[in-house]
Image (cartoon, helix red, strand yellow):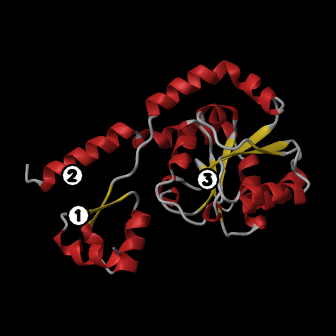
């Protein structure tokens, strides 16, 4: 299939990528000119997110109480499939180091997958059962964004990373590895902090930078930075691309 795609590439009007990072990677690995690509970022439903924020605004402490989280505890959130490339075990190890200085913080995992048992075992081995929560799969992840204070992403590979953009739209600064489109929409020290390497020490260091920063300012920057990435703008970009491709 990859060979067929490569052979047909010169005949295509354009190849759509969900980030510059992905376009550059495919261009290099498949030996296709970068000029053949059009970058259209995947949008998030900003209107639905605003509705969720209003709906859960008064239920924040109630939802936290259901999970055993106290009102004043700082919560890092991770929403993703439990698979190897997401590296949740690295997040646990980094949080263990960070937690030594900040025992009043919590880490909340939302998602399920083939690595769930491995992550659960890592939490147990680190002695963090009371600090790290694994809630599994959820049909309503928005409620978890509304009770968190920041988003922790330790993925080795990402495309656009919808959950990262959703976090920003909920006003959650990102602590993230520099992957996929995250490297393009996170501005280090403004709406988030990059993890410099795939080590527990680097994860803990980035978390420390965030917790020591002006959180309200960083949160506001997160909200503002998400506004250009609404799903309506994405739909318009595809419509314009289609019209160009048929010569209108």
Assess disc 1: are there few (<14), some (14-19) or many (≥20) residues with their C-alpha within 10 Å of its C-alpha.
some
**Mark 3, secondary structure of its residue:** loop
User: What's the mark number on residue 81?
Assistant: 3
Pick the front one: 99 or 217 = 99
Q: Position of residue 85 (x, y in %)?
A: 61, 65
Relative height, residue 197 to residue 7 (above, below):
above
User: What's the mark number on residue 71?
Assistant: none
Q: CA distance from mark 2 to mark 1?
A: 9 Å
* 240 lies left or right of 112: left
Relative height, residue 64 to residue 21 (above, below):
above
Q: Residue at x 84, y 32 (%)?
A: 68
Q: For marks 2 and 3, give the one nearer the viewer.
A: 3
Question: Where does label 2 land, which residue?
Answer: 241
* 64 lies left or right of 48: right
Assess disc 3: are there few (<14), some (14-19) or many (≥20) residues with their C-alpha within 10 Å of its C-alpha.
many
Q: Earlier in the sequence, mark 2 or mark 1?
A: 1
Q: Position of residue 26 (x, y in %)?
A: 38, 72
Q: Position of residue 144 (x, y in %)?
A: 66, 35
Q: Name the image quarter holding residue 97.
A: bottom right
Question: Where does label 1 land, which residue?
Answer: 14
Q: Name the image quarter holding residue 156.
A: bottom right
Q: Residue at x 77, y 54 (%)?
A: 208
* Residue 33 seen by the camera: no
Q: Residue at x 74, y 54 (%)?
A: 207
Please identify the quadrant where the N terminus is shown: bottom left
Q: Name the image quarter holding residue 23.
A: bottom left
Q: CA distance from mark 2 to mark 3?
A: 32 Å
């Amino acid at each position: 299939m990859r060979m067929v795609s490569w052979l047909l590439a010169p005949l295509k009007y354009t190849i759509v990528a969900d980030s510059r990072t992905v376009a550059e990677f495919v261009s290099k690995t498949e030996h296709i000119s970068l000029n053949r690509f059009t970058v259209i970022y995947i949008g998030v439903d900003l209107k639905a997110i605003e509705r969720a924020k209003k709906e859960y605004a008064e239920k924040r402490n109630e939802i936290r109480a259901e999970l055993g989280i106290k009102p004043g505890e700082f919560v890092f959130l991770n929403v993703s499939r439990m698979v190897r490339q997401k590296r949740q075990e690295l997040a646990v190890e980094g949080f263990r180091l960070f937690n030594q200085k900040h025992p009043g913080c919590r880490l909340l995992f939302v998602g399920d997958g083939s690595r769930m048992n491995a992550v659960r075992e890592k939490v147990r081995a680190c002695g963090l059962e009371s600090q790290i929560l694994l809630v599994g799969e959820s049909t309503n992840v928005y409620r978890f964004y509304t009770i968190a204070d920041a988003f922790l992403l330790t993925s080795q590979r990402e495309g656009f990373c919808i959950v990262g953009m959703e976090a920003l739209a909920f006003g959650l600064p990102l602590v993230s590895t520099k992957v996929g489109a995250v490297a393009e929409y996170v501005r280090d020290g403004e709406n988030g902090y990059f993890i410099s390497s795939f080590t527990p020490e680097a994860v803990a260091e980035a978390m420390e930078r965030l917790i020591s920063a002006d959180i309200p300012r960083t949160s506001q920057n997160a909200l503002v930075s998400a506004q250009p990435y609404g799903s309506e703008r994405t739909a318009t970009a595809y419509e314009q691309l289609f019209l160009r491709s048929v010569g209108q």
